[in-house]
Amino acid sequence: MSSQNMDPNIHPNRSSHISDREIPEETKRKTFADMRTQKSLPSEMRRNSTLTVEEIMKRDEKILDENKALYGWGKIGSRPHNLYPKKLDDNINNENDSHPDHQPITRMSYGLQKIFLINSNHTIYEWCSNSQSATKLAVNDESNSKLDIIDLATEKSRMYAISSDNELFCCDDSDIGQIGGGERRINLKKLHLDAVVAFVQLSTGNSHALALTDTGLVYAWGNGANGRLGLGAVEGFDVPQLVRELTDYRVVKVCSGRAHNLVMGIAMNATERGPLGSIRVSEDNSHLALSWGHGADGKLGTGSTKDELLPRILDVYGNVSQVACGFMHSAIIVDGDLMMFGSNEFGQLGTGNTNSYHFPTRVNYLSGNQIVDVSCGGFHTVAMTDDGEVFSW
């Protein structure tokens, strides 16, 4: 067994068998920075039980809505680096303004060079790597009709979006132009599928994309290297393909890393899914986490570093309430505990060391907190508790 899996924080076969050995105080102070928001989260968000796709979406929107203002740190656009969390653009955050553009943010999406925000009025803002402030986007379809967008994601030079009619669209950099007055125009092209499905969530990697339907089906397309499409091969596809290995699950959340993916969903018997749009799930089932794609550094959480061409269930006990992917590391929340795995070169796993882990491993520093949300950047991680505390490392 490799040395990465011999750390006393984890059991070689079961990730839940983790000691409660405390990390030294001096390590905590060096590794973590934390800050408290002005308002705690509502009680209904303090424990995530089995949720539907719609409830997951509403939960994530409520996190943004309850905290109102948007803060950022590090490099945002072409601004000087923020060394501390700083409130961003009053023209977006002004919660007292009745202007239709100044509404609560309901969705965030970010890539290597861009950050996108969508508010409750479907207004979209964009930060680019060379911009000082957010730019408003005007989004149209191929006939130049206005589109209301509920989710979007980018990979390299391409953008994907879901309209309020739950249809899937895409565009290249060549479809983006200036229209004056500080606004940019985007013309989206509809992606046509053989099946009639309603999309509700997107996630993109470096050169591939996942889309989730309202009935819990997952579609994948793009570069197929390392099995990142979950189709059992390394072939790429320009048109979204149904990930058939996941049709025995009602998936409620998809997340893509650079070349790997995590999803969470509920296992179903083969007889429980009828025609597309017809599902039946037992209410007492817990959510599971599944991963596939590029396996280097153990970021799939399977105990191995090999690539997985098909989705594979992670060996954890409890209800999974969130999944997140970075470039080379991953995170899941299980019964309120944050568990991480993959590359730890920059301490992004929060374990107090720089050892990589091949199994989901509890972040002991956060033990005793109920973690309700987590996000993985390229080489860092941010998590939030049910009391509204935010931790980053």
Image: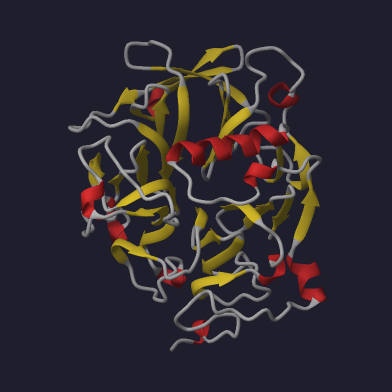
Which corner quadrant holds the N terminus? bottom left
Residue 378 coordinates in the image, percent (x, y): 55, 55
- Give residue 168's quadrant in the image: top left
Q: Say if residue 363 shows up in the picture.
A: yes
In the visual, does 316 lie left or right of 361? Answer: left
Residue 28 coordinates in the image, percent (x, y): 77, 70
Q: Which residue sits at x=62%, y=57%?
A: 381
Question: 222 above or below 199?
Answer: below
Q: How many marks?
A: 0
Q: Residue furthest left?
A: 194
Residue 115 coordinates in the image, percent (x, y): 57, 37
Seen from the viewer's position, the closer of residues 50 and 368 is 50
Q: Say if residue 158 shows up in the picture.
A: no
Seen from the viewer's position, the closer of residues 248 and 147 is 248
Which corner quadrant holds the C terminus? bottom right
Q: Which residue sits at x=42%, y=37%?
A: 201
Residue 18 coordinates in the image, percent (x, y): 59, 79
Q: Which residue sits at x=39%, y=76%?
A: 304
Q: Which residue sits at x=20%, y=33%?
A: 195
Question: 69 above or below 382?
Answer: above
- How was the colour assigned to the protein in this rendering? secondary structure
